[in-house]
Image (tube, rainbow, N blue to C red):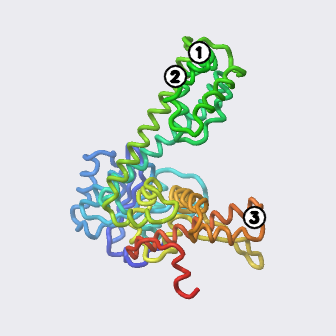
Amino acid sequence: MIDTTNDTTSRVLIAIDIAKHNHDLIIRIPEGRKIRMRIPNTLDGYKKLKEQLMPFPMETVLCGFEPTADYHRNIAFWLGQQGAEMRLISSLACARAREMLFKTRDKNDRKDANVILYLLDQGISEPFHDPLVSGIMDVQEICNTYQQIVLSRSRVVHSLLNHSITLFFPEIERFYHNSRSEWWCNFLLKFPTPGSITRYRQQTFVKRAWKVVGRKQNKQRFLEELYEIAGNSTALPVSLDSQSVAMFRVQLRRFLQLTQQRKELETLADGLLEERSDYRRLRTLPGVGPIIALMILAEGGDLRRFKHHRQFLNFCGFNLSAQQSGQQRGRYHLSKRGNARLRYAFWLAANSAIRNHENSFRDKFSRYIKSNPEDADIKRKGRVAVAIKMARVAHSLVKNDCDYRGYHEYGYGM
């Protein structure tokens, strides 16, 4: 994104190479002189920078930096509060400019600051939208914490299925149908091994396990089948009071704890966002629930800042790109240069929508795969096309502040 609206010749430019403990800076004042500084990532360091800027109005200060983890957030917020304009410099642009300017791929902090200053002077930057100032920091932190809980929970599930279950009760895996099957863990906590089942008579086991397995059709027959399976299990003959089984139960409790934390965050997110208009509009989309809407708002921020849906698609990385040289022209494919978590959110929403009937997303997917419904590659491309449409419609709903209307395109004589 090239910014051509600002004339940098009359402004104070600050190029900041971000690091965890110290920042390298180059300050270029309007007369052309450059000042090099190295400041610690502390309030005293920020004040030292402010002293250098005392002769100039803060409204004329333009700061550029390449985002590095979250180390840029503190200094960017502090300078923004002082009145400076903050700009983001793309990591890819820095890498390409470094090779162009220095004819080498070598990098160091001093060189990176020069590259950032060059790109800032050329207007090759984009606005920095501070999450705290924009009011989406709480949303982002809930989304990040939710993701960490989901990742931790996935690791526990893989450990259970690929290790513990294989040793202690391999036949029970067939009853694990989805990640929200809490009855499965509660059952294994009470009956972790086949021996813990067969030590009772069938009628006694059915009575003890009746409430543990939750609501099920033909529960009597289901429990009798479990008893038969336990009697013919290939599990290792481990004692019920052994430390191995105790560690198995630790993993099961960890699974249930993470599941409960995930539910609490889902409730918290819905309560925090339910009053927001953009959240309510997104929830009207097929396949978009509380968490996917949370991810879209956390990663995209205020979607109204994108004047056209193509800008939003570029931000997501859903724009098409191809390489062309002379008579050779490559095939178009997704650039994937945008926000990967936004693409993932719309991918999840698209897959959920096409599993439901009677919505335009399902209809688009059906038309896409009509030529060869069994081709896996065509199915994948169809899902991507639906995800792109999902992103386009989401931007339109928020921008126009309206709800999604199913099959609305057929209401205009099409």
**Element type where label 2 sits in the image:** helix
Tell me the amino acid under the disc marked 3. Pro
Q: Identify the residue at the far bottom of this view.
A: 413
The secondary element bearing badge 1 is classed as loop
Q: Residue at 58% across / 52% down in the picture?
A: 106
Q: Amino acid at mark 2?
A: Arg
Upstream in the sequence, badge 3 or badge 1?
A: 1
Snapshot quadrant of residue 199: top right
Q: Where in the figure is residue 200, as x and y percent of width and height?
A: 59, 15
Q: Position of residue 59 (x, y in %)?
A: 26, 69
Q: Are marks 2 and 3 in contact (CB under 8 Å)?
A: no
User: In the figure, residue 184 lies in which quadrant?
Assistant: top right
Q: Are marks 2 and 1 in contact (CB under 8 Å)?
A: yes
Give the label on residue 16, or none.
none
**Residue at the image point whose x is 45% and y is 53% from the top:** 291
Q: Which one is in front, 302 or 133?
A: 302
Task: Name the residue that disc number 2 marks.
Answer: 208
Residue 243 placement, left or right of 266: right
Mark 2 or mark 3: which is in front? 2
Measured as percent of width and height from the top left, residue 227 is found at 64, 24
Q: Which residue is mark 1?
A: 200
Quarter of the image with the C terminus in it: bottom right
Tell me which numbered mark, 2 or 3, is placed earlier along the sequence. 2
Q: Secondary structure at mark 3?
A: loop
From the top left corner, tell me how far across and down residue 351 is, in percent: 59, 58
The residue depicted at 25 percent of the width and 64 percent of the height is: 83
Q: Which of pointers 2 and 1 lies earlier in the amino acid sequence?
A: 1
Q: Which residue is mark 3?
A: 373
Say few, some or many: other residues with alpha carbon within 10 Å of mark 3 (under 14 / 14 to 19 / 20 or more).
Answer: few
